[in-house]
Amino acid sequence: MQIELRDIRKTFGSVQANAGISLRIASTAIQGILGENGAGKSTLMKILSGFILPDSGDILLDGARVVIHSPADAIRQGIGMLHQDPLDFPPMRILDNFILGKPGGVFPDRRKAAREFRELAGQFDFSLDADAFVDTLTVGERQQLEILRLLWFGARVLILDEPTTGISQPQKEKLFATLQRLASQGMAIVFVSHKLEDVELLCSTVAVLRQGMLVGTAEPPYDTKSLVRMMFERDVSFTGKTALQPGKPILSLRGVSLEALRLQIIDVSFEARAGEVIGLAGMEGSGQSVLLSACAGLVRPVAGTVRLGDTDVTGLSYHAFMKHGVAYLPAARLEKGLVAGLSLTDHFVLSEGTGSVFIDRRRAADVAADRICTFNIKGSPSHPVESLSGGNQQRMLLALLKESLSLILLEHPTRGLDIESTLYIWGKLRERCARGAAIVFISADLDEVLQYSDRVLVFFSGRISPPLPGAGLTVEQLGGLIGGKGWDSLAGVAHG
Amino acid sequence: MGKARASNAFLQVGAIVVAILLTTLVLLAAKAPPLAAYANIVLGAVGSWDVAANVLVSWVPLLLATAGLLITFTAGLWNIGIEGQITLGAIFTTWMLRGLQTSGIDPSLIIPLSIVAGMAGGALWALLAGALKTFGGVNEIFGGLGLNFVASALNLWLIFGPWKRPGVASMSGTVPFAPSLWLPTISAQSRLSPAALLLALCAIVVVYMLLQGTHFGLRLKAVGKNPNAAYLLGVPTWQHMMTSFALCGIFAGLAGAVQVTSVYHRLIPSISSGYGYLGLMVAMLAGFRAALVAPVALFFAALNVGSIQLPIVLRQDSSLAGVLQGTLVLFVLLAQGLRQRLAGRG
């Protein structure tokens, strides 16, 4: 089936996720979609698979204009989406998952379904046992199940979102062979990824998105450099960093290994020193969050040691880390950082800790008024914290930080904030550095990483680069590393 | 703001009107004259000093249970197990009274001791539900429900086994204690104990102050509203949940102790009398606000006592109070849900 997208636009609040994207995907094509975080890939795929409706623009399937109202509608029209996290039901059997969602009366014909499942699985040389439970499968096998199900439902377009994350090399090879075979049978494949190598290996054509727009296309043979440039090109130039006077180490990780849901981080060592800012760069889900959580004591390492100053804190809880002057600010401000339903003043009382049984309301009001003023928070002390705008919520989180901190860990400190708030927040964070704190932060925004980091750690599928000095780093270098290119040349970089 | 408050009040009043209308329909379906029925309930609750005193007797355990539930609700916990906690309070109180009744210790010491034992029993049972949740991953609703059954089985086993009356065991409970071990009441006939009433009023005031004015109360609120954020803000989350279970259990145990020492003077099979479940409804109807709990609980107690008249006068079942209480809670919650939907849309 041939797909044509004409001038697709979608706005979320003030953010233009898709700003007029037009793209034609031929049947038999394997269309790669590249772009950094927030470039608009997910939005476009969600529109194509019926999760959201575009604000304007047309979708044409085989030349006919269609409106896709829901994911179920999409599959009826032949568009199947394979999500990064398979949408299956782990406690159920494979066959039940296979049948689920298929219209067909009250009593599904299990025997017929089972026969068709085996035929289909045989065609692609997938060895899946229809009676096994889904929770015994690997991510790659769950993907295979999902592909079979979508094919059985009559999908003629297959959209895959980051399908090579968390699967083994042989599974990846099998997946690619399957996709190539499906394309040759006349299906259209849309392959969304940030892994340049996979895209270059598989795709017959590539479209690159940046800031909600289609900025270029490419055909094989691919030129990695030009793909990276298209993905990450910037107008701004960065002021070079002055070389840092290294302070004493505040946080040191030695040979730390971590296990997360879909990735493993093996043998990481690095130090954060007083007064320095370390940026963690990489596509979302490449291991940054897990490592940052481990630095906060929220995730326990499976091997290695974590030290704060001279104290070994390996395996201790976040509250023990807090006593050593660690603070962790999560990305989900309202979900994990603040308590919706409590007022600003309540938050200050909570973070101050307890010196007495009863709350000193007058003192609390003074503290609240003082902090709200110092941190320029636009909100009233008695209002619930969820009434604040995103920028003010982030200021609020900063205002809640204790006076004496040695290590501040931040997840996406300025995500979704306007430029004024961003500058303000980094101003405040730098004040902390000047007073001797170390900062480790995650950002999906390359500008932010390059602008504020003294050193950068790059993440790719759980692999972590040695600390790279921020001063010498270019957008191209960083973009390539994030896409999985240029890692071999890193071997020479000294551990710092 | 003013408009929102007006529509809010309108919805609340509407909910009460609808609840009364529905109860009226039930009455009509049962071929009972609605007005006479309501009049009888009112008379049955305030018609004489005796019935009014009975309302207060019923108010005491309801107030105690609801006071405890406010603490667990604040921590975001549904302590369904409160029925069992009341029962365990009654069992521990009875156990202490039985143990000390022939010891020669002064009754003025035995009674407080046995009440404290009841509080400990309630706390123990609540901590079990809490431990199941914290360390075993069992939802407190399921754990509490299971523990309720265990508690009532334990109660029946004691009444029909080790603590049975001499001769033949009976549904009417264990042998009544000597009057010297009763909590003093306002008159010989009445079961209203000023001490119990005072304890219940103190309980709700203490809970109000705990939740409004203390660091513990604020931290509990934070845990209830967002345990993740509370943890990151430095609040030890599970410790606060366990403490809230224990505190609720203490109040529930006290309710059980009062039932034994001032109302029944013995252990009976239905010693908790459903006050725990009723307390859940009172807390919901009061919107989990301590200041509203006392009047709402008094109203529910009045409905319970008032409807006792119905079988006698109108040959209607006294469960009509339950119908009215249940529909009231349902419609008030429905009104709150509607309000939120309207607010969400606007």
Image (cartoon, helix red, strand yellow):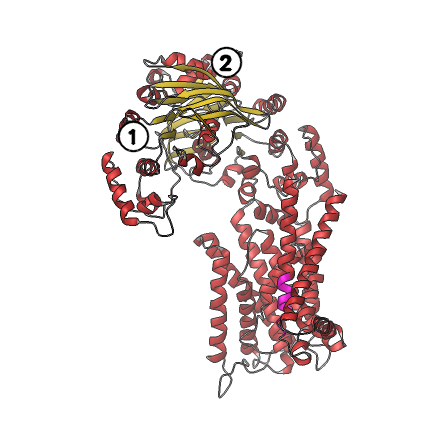
What label does residue A234 carry, if any?
2
Vertical arrangement, residue B143 with respect to residue B149, above or below: above
Image depth: mark 2 or mark 1 in front: 1
Q: Which residues are magenta?
A: B318-327
Relative height, residue A407 to residue B52 (above, below):
above
Q: Earlier in the sequence, mark 2 or mark 1?
A: 1
User: Badge 1 local density, few (<14 within 10 Å), some, or many (20+)?
Assistant: many
Secondary element at image label 1: helix
* Tag 1: amino acid: Leu
Compared across the picture, whether B189 is left or right of A149 comes to right
- From where the camera sits, is residue A248 visible? no
- Check residue A175 in the rendering and tell me which mark sits there, or answer none: 1
The answer to whether residue A278 shows anywhere in this view is yes
Q: Is residue B189 magenta?
A: no
Cα separation, mark 2 vs mark 1, equals 34 Å
Q: Chain of mark 2?
A: A
Please state which of residues B68 and A135 is positioned toward the viewer in this rendering.
A135
